[in-house]
Every structure is written in structure tokens, then in C-alpha cells.
Image: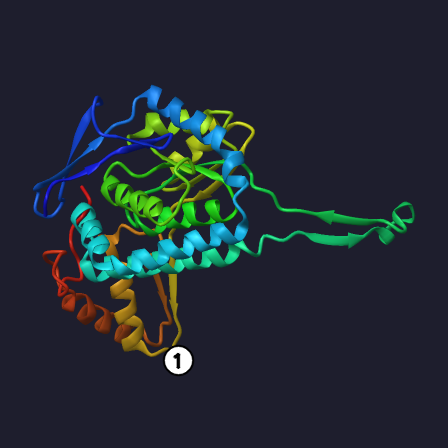
Amino acid sequence: MMKAYARLYIDGEWIRTGREISPLINPYSQEVIGEQVLATPTDVERALQSAFEAKNIIKAIPAYKRAQVLKAVARNLEAEKEPFAKLITAELGKPLKNTLDEVSRSIETLELSAEEAKRLTGETSYGEASPRGMGAIAATFRVPVGVVAAITPFNAPLNLICHKIGPAYAAGNSVILKPAPQTPLIATRLLELLLESGFHPKSINLLLGGAAVGRQMVKDARVNVVSFTGGVTAGRNICETAGMKKVLLELGGNAPTIVHEDADIQYAAAECAKSGYSNSGQSCISVQRMYVHHAVIHAFVDHLKQAVSRLQVGDPCSLESDIGCMVD
């Protein structure tokens, strides 16, 4: 593939020069496939101020228009499904069959976000539960929270960005996105697609870099919500740094699978093998523990061994490969 560039996007402007540059290496072939521009503390400050000033602009966009834009993104992503999947594979080493599925999931995420944009309704309740509330009606309304800091991991670099940007935009918020340092190219390409599809140019800022960039975002008082997907240690640090703001954390898992004695043993073993080795094990929702009924344990283990032995390890760009490589 041609060399690609992951750029900063701050206050409606793409930035590619005048900053430290980091090479991006395909983890399978070890080829340099691109470069990323690393944000400075000044860049982070500019992004924070831009998002803060833009929150009322995004809030004023009617819900039906936000829904239309998100639907347009989903349609345009569908039209570019294969290029997006190949870019994820090149950056991450996840097999193409899995990245094609990730793009499909991302399209669904955006479509669902578009639908929810028009369902952000409040509720009413009558005050007659109390004598002093007789004759009164209480009404609640949902309003945008303001600025969302979105920090995403490498293992599902497209879908997990969509999981944050889609709902945030649907609800009328401005966003500052910091993707994982290992997968900034797909974040850059998605941001281009968002803008091409009608996202307001000030609705989102893109910052690239490591933990220092994240810390500066998280602790800033102009941020109203921190949405983070990643590891427990980083999640704990975010909670300690965030202060008086909303924090949404999706951290690691230790997912158990239970196989009963009346299960389809061959099918269960095949699914456990598939999930357990998915994305080279770099997934919080993969099968990590298996509890198998003693009556079928020996048959299950035999089928599991066979299923694992059939998994194809190789070039993640090949549709025949089930397992690619670790990200680094």
C-alpha cells in the first residue's frame, strides 16, 4: 500500500507538519506504511478550547439533521467497506475476514446512533405521590452534556471510535478523539469520511499521541465526559485524574463460557476456538475461560483440539487466515 499519513485535526484544520513525526509499521510485514503527527501540549489546549467553544454550535443542530448526517456516514462507509477493512488489517494485523466484519459492525453502530438521535426524549411524572405535590407535574428533558473526550484502543479501532462519536454526535455534543497510537490511520480516514458526510467542521478534534495527551484532556475542566475503552490501569488513572466529571469506562474482561452436557459439543468447541484466538487474543470479549460439564469434558477437549488445529495462521491480508499477528 502507498504510505499514508495520520494527521491532527484541530479547530477545523488539518495539521501535518511542524510536529514530531512517528513512523507506522505494519506488524506483520514490518514495512513502514505511514507516519503520524504527534500532538504537542499547545495542540491539546487548542483542541480543548475549540471543542468548548463549539459545544453550543453542535447543540443547536436539530436532532433530525444530526440523524441525517449519521445515516450519510453509514452509507458512505458501506461504499468504502473493503478499503477501510484493508487499512485496519495493515495497521493492526487483524485478519481481513475480521476487519470486514468490524466495518459492518461500525455501519450498524452509526445507523443505530442515527436512530437514537431522534429518541432523546424526557419523561413526565405527577406529584400526587406527596400531599405537597398535588396538582403538579414534573417534566425532565435530555440536553447535550457538552464536551466528550473519547479515548479508544487499538483492537477494534474503527468500531470503538464509532461507539463513542456516533452517540456523542447524536446527542448534540462536541468531541475530542484520541485513538490508540498503534492505529491512527483508520481514525484519520474515518474523520475524513465524517467531514465528507456532513459533520460540522468544529464538531470534532483529533489528537494523536500517548498517555501525556490523554492526561491533559482528562484533567481539563472544559471536558464534561471522559469515555475510555482500554485497560484497568489506565482506567484507574483516568478516575484519579478526571475530577468532578462523568467518566465512562469499558475495561478488560475475563470472559467465561459454559458448556452444558446437552450442548452441541462440536459446535461449542468450534466457537470457543474461533473466539479464543480472535484478533490473536487481543480482545476483552474473547473466550478466556471455559467451564465444561464433566460428562462431556473429554469429547469437548478432543473437538477443541481439532478446531484449534484447523485455524490458519498467516498473512492477515489473506481471507484464508484466521490468525494474523500481535499488534506489536
Residue at 18 percent of width and 54 percent of height: 86
Nearer to the camera, 10 or 218: 10
**Along the viewing direction, whichever of 107 and 93 lies nearer the viewer:** 107
Q: Quarter holding the C terminus?
A: top left
Q: Nearer the viewer, residue 161 or 265?
A: 161
Residue 110, image quadrant: bottom left
- Label count reads 1
The secondary element bearing badge 1 is classed as loop
Relative to 17, residue 268 above or below: below
Q: Can residue 71 be seen?
A: yes
Question: Could one spot residue 207 in this view of the protein?
Answer: no
Colour convention = rainbow
Residue 240 is situated, as x and y percent measured from the top left of the image, at 48, 28
The location of residue 144, given as percent across then percent down, is: 56, 41
- Position of 279 relative to 182 (above/below): below
- Name the residue at 28% across, 73% down: 300
Where in the figure is residue 219, as x and y percent of width and height?
46, 25
When asked about the image quadrant of residue 275, the answer is bottom left
300 sits left or right of 129 in the view = left
Residue that extends furthest to the right in the rendered view of this protein: 131
- Residue 128 in the image, given as x and y percentages of width and height: 87, 53
Q: Please tell me in which quadrant of the rendered image residue 74 appears.
A: bottom left
Closer to the camera, 79 or 120?
Answer: 79
Q: Residue at x 74, y 53 (%)?
A: 124
Residue at (54, 35) in percent of width and height: 56
Residue carrying label 1? 262
- Left or right? Give the position of 45 relative to 315: right
The amino acid beneath tag 1 is Asp
Residue 139 as seen in the image, left or right of residue 250: right
- Within 10 Å of disc 1 (Cα), the crowding (few <14, some 14-19, many 20+) is few
